[in-house]
Every structure is written in C-alpha cells, then in structure tokens.
Amino acid sequence: MAYDDLRSFLETLDKQGQLLHIGEELSPEPDLAAAANAAGRIGDGAPALYFDNVRGFTDARIAMNVHGSWRNHALALGLPAATSVKDQVEEFARRWDAFPVAPERREDAPWRGNSLTGTDVDLFAVLPLFRLNDGDGGFYLDKAAVVSRDPEDPDNFGKQNVGTYRIQVIGRDRLAFQPVPMHDVAQHLRKAEERDEDLPIAITLGNDPVMSIVAGMPMAYDRSEYEMAGALRGAPAPIATAPHTGFDVPWGSEVVIEGVIEGRKRQLEGPFGEFTGHYSGGRRMPVIRVERISYRDDPVFESLYLGMPWTEVDYLVGPNTCVPLLKQLRAEFPEVRAVNAMYTHGLAVIISTAKRYGGFAKAVGLRALTTPHGLGYVSQVIVVDEDVDPFDLPQVMWAMSAKVNPADDVVVIPNLSVVELAPAASPAGITSKMLTDATTPVAPDNRGNFSTPAKDLPETEEWVGRLKSLLAAR
C-alpha cells in the first residue's frame, strides 16, 4: 500500500497496534522528547507516539517515533510488520531497480487550505515547538524534506534536490540552516552565492513515510528523489506546485514553508544533540528568511528524537543508506553481496564480498570511501567474506577476531573528508579513515592457516526450520 500523506500512515499504524495515543496532559519539555527517547529503548517493535494534550499549547497534534522500529519501517514500505531487517533491505534494493517512476502532479493539495504571508508570517503560530535535548540551542525542525534547485539549471527536474537537514528556529520568520558541504543543497547555495543571489527554498513538514525515507537517502546529484519515491512506493509519488517558489513539493505535507536562504549571511546555529550521540556545538550557518507558510487544517507536527543510538533516525536512514552503497559498489564490483551501513548513518560500514584475487577486498573497501555517501560519512569499513552475513554481528566479530592480522589487514588513511558533525573529526570535517580486511586471503595472498574451515552440518538448515516450528507450537 502506498501512503499519500502522514495521516493515512498513522491510521495504518493505529490499526496494526503500532501507534500509541498518549492522551494525558504532558509538559512539552521534557516529556515529549523523553517519551520518544524511551521508545528507542523498548525494542524493535516500538510504536509511533501521538500527543494531543500538551500543556501550553491550545491545539497541538504531535507525532514522534513514526519510523522508530523495524515494524513501522516495514509498514511504511507496505510490507508485513514482521518482515525481517535483511528482507526489508533486500526488498528495498529490488524496488530501487524500478527507478525512475515519474511522479503524479495534483492540484488539490490539502496544505493549500491555510496560509500566512508577508508580515503575518509566524512560525510559532503554526508549529508547537519544543526542545529535544537539554543542551539544544533552541527549537529544531529535524524531520523536514527541504526542496531546492540548481541555480544554473533550475528546470532540470533531476537536479531539484529533496533532502533532510537540521533547521533551527531563530525567529518568527527566520531559520538557521546547516547545509553539509557534500550535500546537494550546499552545492546549490554555493552556486547561488557565486552569482550573488539568494537561494529559494521550500521546507515541507509532516510528509508521507516514503518521502521521509527518500529525503535522507544518498543519491546521485541528478537523480530525482520523487522518481525514487515512486519506485519505492510502487506507485507515482504525488506532488504539487508550491505557490511562492514554484517548486515541486509533496502533495500530502502537513506544512509547507517557503522563502530564501539569504546569500552570504551567516548566524550562530546550535548546539544540537545529533545522530552521533553527541552535541554538535555551535557554528555560523546560513539563514533562511521565511516568506510564506501554507498548512493543512489542524496540522500534525512531526518530529523525531535524536541522541544516543538507537533512536528513530537510525531506523529511518538504515536501509536507505545500505542500498545506495550496495548498488554503487556492485555496479563496479558485481562480487559484492551485501552492505550493512546502519550504524550512525554509515560512519561505519560492513561489506560482504566474493574475491577475484588477493587484495580484492581492500579495493572494494577503498571504493566505499569514495562513493557519494562515503566521501562525507564512511569512516570505518569492515570487509567480510561472501558467506558472512554483514547484518549478523556475531558472524562479523568472528571474522574480525579470526581472520585479521592487524599488520597486514588494517589500512589507515589520514586527512580525508567527513561530515563536520562527526565527533572524532579533528579539525571538524577532516578525519583519518580505517579499512579492515576481515576476509580469507586468496592467491596470490597466501598468508595464514585457513585451509580447513569448519562448516555447518548439511542438516543444520532443515533443523533450523524444525526448531522454529516446535517453538511456535508450544
């Protein structure tokens, strides 16, 4: 089933027992964030949370942890709730191959029902804002899909970017914005500032569940997120024209904010508790001037809690980081079997691969560092044999402990790029990167004593099924 908006997905979560409505009166701080934080600590079946009785807000509807479990993630893709993580990643990869699926333009977007323009623009009048962590520098919009266009090629649909970036509310019509240098919106801003122009922008809140997944996906610069959303949904993604910028935005959004990133203007942004499990500190960042707010009747404000993993963001950007890396690597190395990039948005990546010859696994790992996502995120790569499941950490740790000779199998490369939010970077944006070859050496690399491996008995797979059946029948 393809969901056209957040509300229809919340209805499905409710029917599936994956939405918890908390009706008691709560304080916006710390209760909302603490509840979402707690959801990340109760296991892979955690529900989405819905709040509509928040002290200090007369008419707030707030959704959190919407993607915050593998059950919810499966439902977002229209899969059975019990679909395993590995099967979700494999299905994600299968649907990736359907790209591109052209979107469907609609005229009756529900967010057209209400608007604020000019001096009436007031973010606080529309959004029930609250802080997520005690040390946050202010209120954040942290689950938005941000739309921008290449100023040098504005009519190229593929170069219209839809991405997720952190956005701090710094005034009734002002936002501080963090464009990570290797992301598309940063390239758009650079080009605009070189032309001495502001960069028009649209920010959409409360999107359909696949749009939220796609907005956090590392894709090629000229590939359309809307066309990828269609492939993942199995149906064209519904879009509409934003009235102020003319940009293509999701049809089902709860709120659409339009304005410009003011050229060459910077203001202090942060600190903010980030996906790395650390506060990121404050930096001078671009400023958005909000010129129009459009919103549905009784809008639902969707936010996510970020902090020490795992939280909702780890489920949200897990498969959508694994699959692009898998596809990009496999295009050049068809021997690659699977990629697990679920840890801290791919700062650490585990790759399983067959090998053509000695040293091949290291070549695969080095290529991972130079993919579009690898340039900014991948800091540690572990490469394992094709018969090791990279999603099964006991198997990975066995390969690490039994097959790695540190003198020969660990490669450290200094002074490479990484996202500035990475806590280990020094200075910010620069780090050493590490590749660990945990594969079995093959000729002409004849090191070690790996000639007599122990294998599962031939009957083991049958017995796995029998034991599962016996346990289920108890």
Image: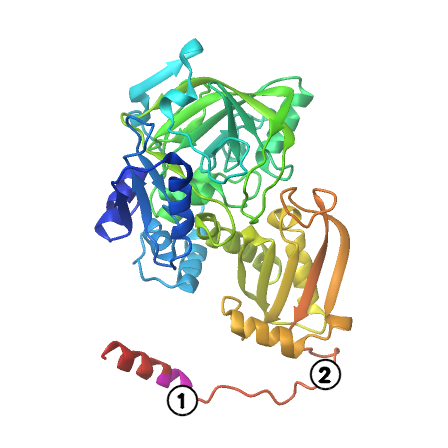
Q: What are the residue bounds of the magenta stretch?
A: 459-463
Describe residue 441's horizontal placement relative to residue 329 as left or right.
Answer: right
Question: Element under label 1?
Answer: loop
Measured from the top left, where is residue 382 in percent x and y? 63, 65
Please tell me whether residue 106 is drawn above or below residue 226 in the rendered image: above
Left or right: 126 in relation to 330: left
Where residue 128 sits in the image (x, y, percent)? 37, 29
Up-down: is 66 above or below 348? Answer: above
- Pointer 1: residues within 10 angstroms few (<14), some, or many (20+)? few
Q: Residue furthest top?
A: 119
Between 14 and 58, the residue placed more toward the observer is 58
Residue occupying image coordinates x 27% and y 25%: 297
Q: Earlier in the sequence, mark 2 or mark 1?
A: 2
Question: Which one is in front, 384 or 295?
Answer: 295
The numbered disc on residue 448 is 2
> Dot 2, crowdedness within 10 Å: few (<14), some or many (≥20)?
few
Q: Which residue matches tag 1?
A: 459
The answer to whether residue 247 is above or below residue 306 is: above
Q: CA distance from mark 2 to mark 1?
A: 30 Å
Percent position of residue 64, x then y: 37, 42
Residue 147 included in the magenta stretch of the image: no
**On the rendered structure, is 158 left or right of 438?**
left
